[in-house]
Image (spheres, rainbow, N blue to C red):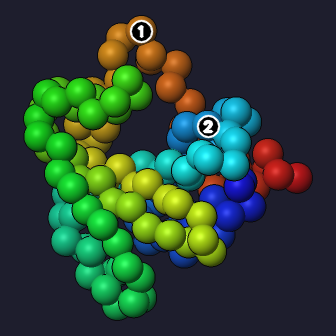
Amino acid sequence: MRQIAVEVMLWLDRFSPWLVGSVLSGTANRFSQIELEIVDEDTKRLELFFLNERMAFETRVAPAALAISAHHRTASNAISIYEILFNECPIVIWCFPDQAARSAQRPRASLNHARARLKDVEALIA
């Protein structure tokens, strides 16, 4: 799954994605999805990218201060969540409108939330 994550991150390179979640931590199983985070104040840019690439996607918006799951929260702005299939692997992309919203997503108990850039994920594979 980390190899697929690298492929997706290369494909989404213009959005500077971070890998997060069970694929990064090494606890993923065959039912896991690859989770990525990006910061882009214009979420329509990601949607246009998907449309231009002819990539089917589903999207939803999580309103401010809504706990989406035990892992994802935001205190200031709504976030857009995109779901795609890449090489038949489910990918979830959390698109934060700004760095402050991304930083505010975790409760204080989870400040150690691991995130990895492409080069770091490639190093894990090597």
Q: Amino acid at mark 1?
A: Ala
Q: Which mark is residue 109?
A: 1
The vertical placement of 86 against 112, above or below, is below
- Residue 2, position as x, y percentages in the image: 71, 54
What residue lies at 54% left-to-right and 41% top-to-bottom? 20
Q: Amino acid at mark 2?
A: Ser
Tell me: residue 106, above or below residue 78.
Answer: above
Q: Residues within 10 Å of mark 2 (few under 14, many from 20)?
A: some
Question: Which residue is label 2 attached to?
Answer: 22
Q: Tell me if residue 31 comes above or below residue 115 in the rendering.
A: below
Q: Residue most toward the top?
A: 109
Residue situated in front as seen by the camera: 57 or 37: 57
Q: Nearer the viewer, residue 31 or 2?
A: 31
Would you say residue 103 is visible in this rendering? no
Q: Which mark is residue 83?
A: none
Q: Position of residue 125 (x, y in %)?
A: 82, 52
Residue at (60% x, 71% y) in the render = 88
